[in-house]
Image (cartoon, rainbow, N blue to C red):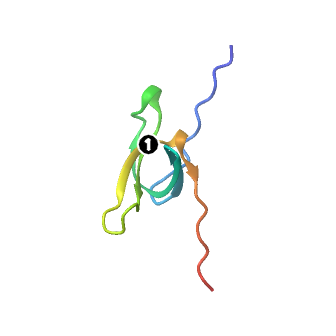
Amino acid sequence: MNMPTKPKHRFKVGDRVRFRLGAHVLAGTVVEDLGKIGVAGQQLVRVEVPLDATDPQEFDISTELLTPSPRRRAAA
């Protein structure tokens, strides 16, 4: 029986990411790599999300739930 391979860690500090929280899709920045401390050795990261302009929120989340967020192009 073939065992599914675990996804390789592809997110690092500074990467822009998106993830679903309830009915909302949030965008944020990876601010800390917590290591493989999740269930069955899943890679966890801390993501900072600017929900409020003065007090951004941080979430600890598995990299399996993240998708890369495209970087915005600089205004010409």
Q: How many marks?
A: 1
Residue sticking out furthest to the top? 1
Residue sticking out furthest to the left? 55
Give me the residue at 46% from left, 60% from top.
14
Give me the residue at 43% from left, 36% from top.
36
In the picture of the structure, the residue carrying the numbered disc 1 is 61
Q: Say above or below: 43 vs 69.
A: above
Residue 6 coordinates in the image, percent (x, y):
58, 31
Q: Quadrant of residue 51?
A: bottom left
Is residue 23 found left or right of 61 in the rendered image?
Answer: right
Indicate the secondary structure of the residue bearing disc 1. Answer: strand
Residue 37 coordinates in the image, percent (x, y):
39, 34
Residue 29 coordinates in the image, percent (x, y):
46, 58
Q: Give whichever of 45, 48 is nearer the camera.
A: 48
Q: Give whichever of 51, 30 is nearer the camera.
A: 51
The amino acid type of the residue labelled 1 equals Ile
Sort mark 1 into few (<14), some (14-19) or many (20+) by Cα contacts within 10 Å.
Answer: some
**Quadrant, the C terminus:** bottom right
Residue sticking out furthest to the bottom? 76
Q: Say above or below: 45 vs 70.
A: above
Residue 60 coordinates in the image, percent (x, y):
39, 44
Give me the residue at 54% from left, 46% from top.
66
Residue sticking out furthest to the front? 23
**Quadrant, the N terminus:** top right
